[in-house]
Image (tube, helix red, strand yellow):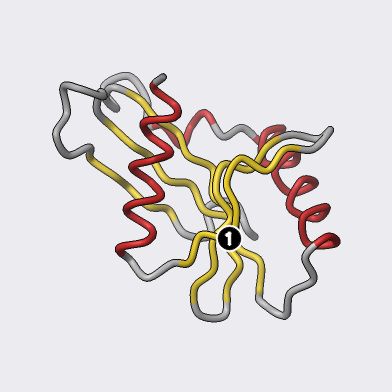
């Protein structure tokens, strides 16, 4: 599936950038967080958006305010279950390409994508 391929690409990207992956596909009644990672002073909640291209719209445009609220609520539950002194941050990783066609997907990492 496109989403799984994009999430794998995002995990590899994050690990190469020095992030420790704490959890993937964390689900609650509010929603799901694709990747939860740590680096430095941050615990990072990552929404991965995979598209063939950005020809019609950037993948980040699909992270609507309603989606942001669901991710924030889900992150709050995760933090209650996993107390941390790290600063929470919400990132979006755009993955452009297609599994089996794109040898190296194009990745755009937007840090603090919807944190005030």
The image shows residue 108, relative to residue 115, as above or below, that is above
The image shows residue 90, relative to residue 58, as above or below, that is below
How crowded pointer 1 is (Cα within 10 Å; few <14, some 14-19, many 20+) is rated as few
- Is 23 positioned to the left or the right of 55 in the image? right
Asked which quadrant contains residue 5, the reply is top left
The residue beneath circle 1 is 22
- Is 91 positioned to the left or the right of 73 in the image? left
Q: Position of residue 72 (x, y in %)?
A: 73, 49
- Is 74 positioned to the left or the right of 51 in the image? right
Q: Position of residue 94 (x, y in %)?
A: 38, 40
Q: Quadrant of the C terminus?
A: bottom right
- Is 23 positioned to the left or the right of 103 in the image? right
Query: What number of labels is visible?
Result: 1
User: Between 95 and 22, which is closer to the camera in this rendering?
Assistant: 22
User: Between 105 and 67, which is closer to the camera in this rendering?
Assistant: 105
Asked which quadrant contains residue 50, the reply is top left
The image shows residue 68, relative to residue 90, as above or below, that is above
User: Between 112 and 7, which is closer to the camera in this rendering?
Assistant: 7
Q: Quadrant of the N terminus?
A: top left
Please report the residue visible at 32 percent of the width from the left and 19 percent of the height from the top: 56
Element at label 1: strand
Please report the residue visible at 78 percent of the width from the left and 62 percent of the height from the top: 79
User: Between 76 and 18, which is closer to the camera in this rendering?
Assistant: 18
Please report the residue visible at 63 percent of the width from the left and 43 percent of the height from the top: 33
Please report the residue visible at 51 percent of the width from the left and 59 percent of the height from the top: 21
Q: Position of residue 104 (x, y in %)?
A: 17, 39
Q: Position of residue 6 (x, y in %)?
A: 38, 34
């Amino acid at each position: 599936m496109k989403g799984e391929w994009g999430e794998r690409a995002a995990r590899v990207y994050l690990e190469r950038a020095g992030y420790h992956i704490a959890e993937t596909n964390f689900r609650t009644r509010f929603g799901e967080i694709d990747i939860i990672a740590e680096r430095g002073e941050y615990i990072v909640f990552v929404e991965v958006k995979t598209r063939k291209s950005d020809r019609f719209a950037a993948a980040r445009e699909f992270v609507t305010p309603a989606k942001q609220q669901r991710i924030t609520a889900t992150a709050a539950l995760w933090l209650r279950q996993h107390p941390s002194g790290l600063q929470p941050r919400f990132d979006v990783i755009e993955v452009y390409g297609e599994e089996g066609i794109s040898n190296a997907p194009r990745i755009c990492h937007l840090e603090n994508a919807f944190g005030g």
